[in-house]
Image (cartoon, rainbow, N blue to C red):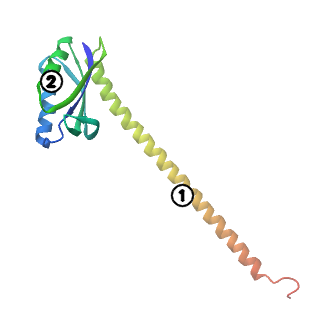
Amino acid sequence: MRYYENLYIIKPTLSEEDYGGVVSKFNELIEKNNGVMIKVDEWGKKTLAYDIKKFDKGFYVLQQFCGEPGIMEELKRYLGLDDKILKYQIIKLSDDVDPEKLLAEQDGGKEKADTEEEKAEEKAEEKAEEKAEEKAEENVEEKAEEKAEENVEEKPTEGEV
């Protein structure tokens, strides 16, 4: 199977319900044509670099999927006919890919990200503890210095006696 990436922009005037319907329509189209959805990333409403069909904003959606060569032509046809789509671009990422392996990498990537977040949190906690310890040590040293100064002030010098 080939590995594709499709980025398309949906009209910004659609309601949330219609927007979700358009996204699910194209996801189902891929699955109906024996494709495998790897990832759907909805970027949300963004400002366009230039006006497209008199719109300056649009909903961006990124799909990554696997399929046979004919799936791309069918997807292009539907994207071109749908008046809710402002613009689209489909690129082929790879010729021969195992979709199961890609799905496993996606799941593994999420787990890896979770563990990296946990490690970052642990490091932040450790740094916070170290700073707290350093402050405590500084406070102890300051108090010791203050006491030493008080003791020096209280002791009369030889000339005062």
Residue plotted at (27% across, 40% down)? 46
Q: Position of residue 140 (x, y in %)?
A: 63, 65
Residue plotted at (15% across, 25% down)? 79
Question: Looking at the image, which is closer to me, 74 or 98?
Answer: 74
Say which mark, if any, is on residue 80.
2
130 vs 54, left or right, is right
Q: Which residue is mark 1?
A: 132
> What is the count of numbered marks?
2
Residue plotted at (65% across, 67% down)? 142
Question: Looking at the image, which is closer to me, 158 or 97?
Answer: 97
Answer with the quarter of the image where residue 157 lies: bottom right
Residue plotted at (70% across, 69% down)? 145
Instruction: Give amino acid for label 1.
Output: Ala
Instruction: Give amino acid for label 2.
Output: Gly
Q: Position of residue 76 (x, y in %)?
A: 17, 20
Q: Earlier in the sequence, mark 2 or mark 1?
A: 2
Say which mark, if any, is on residue 117.
none
1 shown above or below 153: above
Question: Looking at the image, which is closer to me, 69 or 118?
Answer: 69
At mark 1, the secondary structure is helix
- C-alpha separation, residue under disc 2 versus residue under disc 1: 61 Å
- Closer to viewer: mark 2 or mark 1: 2
67 shown above or below 38: above
30 vs 117, left or right, is left
Quadrant that contains the C terminus: bottom right
Which residue reaches farthest bottom?
Answer: 161
At mark 2, the secondary structure is helix
Quadrant that contains the N terminus: top left
Q: Position of residue 60 (x, y in %)?
A: 24, 35
Circle 2 crowding by C-alpha within 10 Å: few under 14, some 14–19, many from 20: some
Which residue reaches farthest right?
Answer: 159
